[in-house]
Image (cartoon, rainbow, N blue to C red):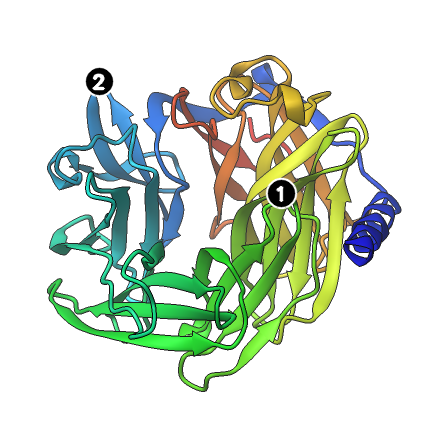
Amino acid sequence: MKIRYLIIVFWTLLFYSCEKSNPEIAGAGELSSISYQEKIYAQPIVVDNQIVSVQNKDNVNFLTAFNNTGSIEWNIDIDDYIIQGTNYDNVPYLFLSKNKNNDVFLNFLNDNNNGSEIIKTVRFNKNGEYISQFTDSIHQNLPNFVSAARRFTGLGVLPLDNGNVSVVSSLTVLTNQHTYIQMSEYNSEGSHLNDTIYTLDELINPYQVFLASNNRLIFQTGDGFGITRFVIFNPGTGEIFTSPEFPVFDLLSFYENSKGNFIFTASAFVDNLSYYGIIISISSNAEYLWHQVYTEQTAWLLTSVSELSDGYIFTGFDITGQLLNEFDWRSSLDNEKVFGIVMKTDFNGKINQNTGWSYRIMSPASTAGAVVLQNETGGYTVFGGKYDRDIHSTMILKLNEMGEIAN
């Protein structure tokens, strides 16, 4: 316990030693954007230079693709695809993903009344045309010595390199200090192919999973008290790499850059319960590379990363003067103290004086950035919306190459 406390103190002091840049402010009158009044249900993704989002308008749920002018390329009613007996407001896991062919996956995970977890994935092509779907429960292929009372718990749905989909679940067993990872694979027609169970010789307690290149799995693990490690597992080779501990409270996004390194945006808090944002980068072998932190009177919580030729663009939102014990994801994001953030950095996450910039967007339609497109003619398209699924507001924001709001 004493060692863990020293680790937390070390990281806190290290994070606070970083210089925070105050963002320039863009007023609502400066925004060049197209606004929509819709409910955003899942973090949008970029597919074939289009922004794809799950949204609700007039009590109808859509999967929508926007181009870099803000125009809608295609729009699909997806109410018929929801897990039976649920609705989009109460599904605890609703996630968009894509594969190398730019197929779009609408993923659901929901608890059943009997204690099992129901998984559903619907596949569309990049033009919004339906391909296939499957609905299943998390398979319980328990090791012989494990009590039937224990269950595999779903972590996520991941598109594999071969075009199939894997439902990833985990089981930790205290008696032998092992973690079991199950990958249930489904083909492009939605048929179940097989279940493969991998044994990890330690308790990693995973509660979120991401997919890197070559089908490597990245698990977010932790103790539930603000300490997080990242465990990288290669099912093909059996290799396991574990990162140092980080004082991460909530992980907000994952990104693999062109060099094969990993970037995570997250949030954390310190002893006085102040809330702040962190960017962390580790190598493909889970070695620490760099970090940036945002503290003082504001907390920058970044929800997406896009790589450019000379650095990154991060988007998210700025919570001004909020304390963790006052913060409610279901209400606080609709007040006057929350603004959108758009930030361009170098490859170490720093705002370079010559090429970097940041904006805090003073608009009620922009309390969170989502994803960014880099236009062919220069400049950027930012898809913005409020991070909470109970809040209605969406916008397409245009920036030039210097990050200035386009008129």
- The amino acid pointed to by label 2 is Asp
Looking at this view, name the residue that lies furthest to the bottom: 237
Residue 72 horizontal/vertical position (percent):
28, 35
Q: Secondary structure at mark 2?
A: loop
Circles 2, 1 touching at the beta carbon (< 8 Å): no
The quadrant where residue 276 appears? top right
Instruction: Please tell me which residue lies in front, 380 or 156.
Output: 156
Q: Quadrant of the N terminus?
A: bottom right
Residue 51 horizontal/vertical position (percent):
37, 44
> Eyeballing the image, is 247 above or below 395?
below
Q: Residues within 10 Å of mark 2 (few under 14, many from 20)?
A: few
Residue drawn at x 69%, y 71% is 287
The quadrant where residue 34 appears? top left
User: Which circle marks residue 249 in the picture?
Assistant: 1
Marks 2 and 1: which is nearer the front? Answer: 1
- The amino acid pointed to by label 1 is Phe
Q: Earlier in the sequence, mark 2 or mark 1?
A: 2
The answer to whether residue 190 shows anywhere in this view is yes
Residue drawn at x 73%, y 46% is 356
> Eyeballing the image, is 300 above or below 129?
above
Residue 22 horizontal/vertical position (percent):
79, 32
> Eyeballing the image, is 135 above or below 295?
below
User: Which circle marks residue 69 in the picture?
Assistant: none
Decide if residue 386 is on the left or right side of residue 318.
left
| Residue corresponding to mark 2 | 58
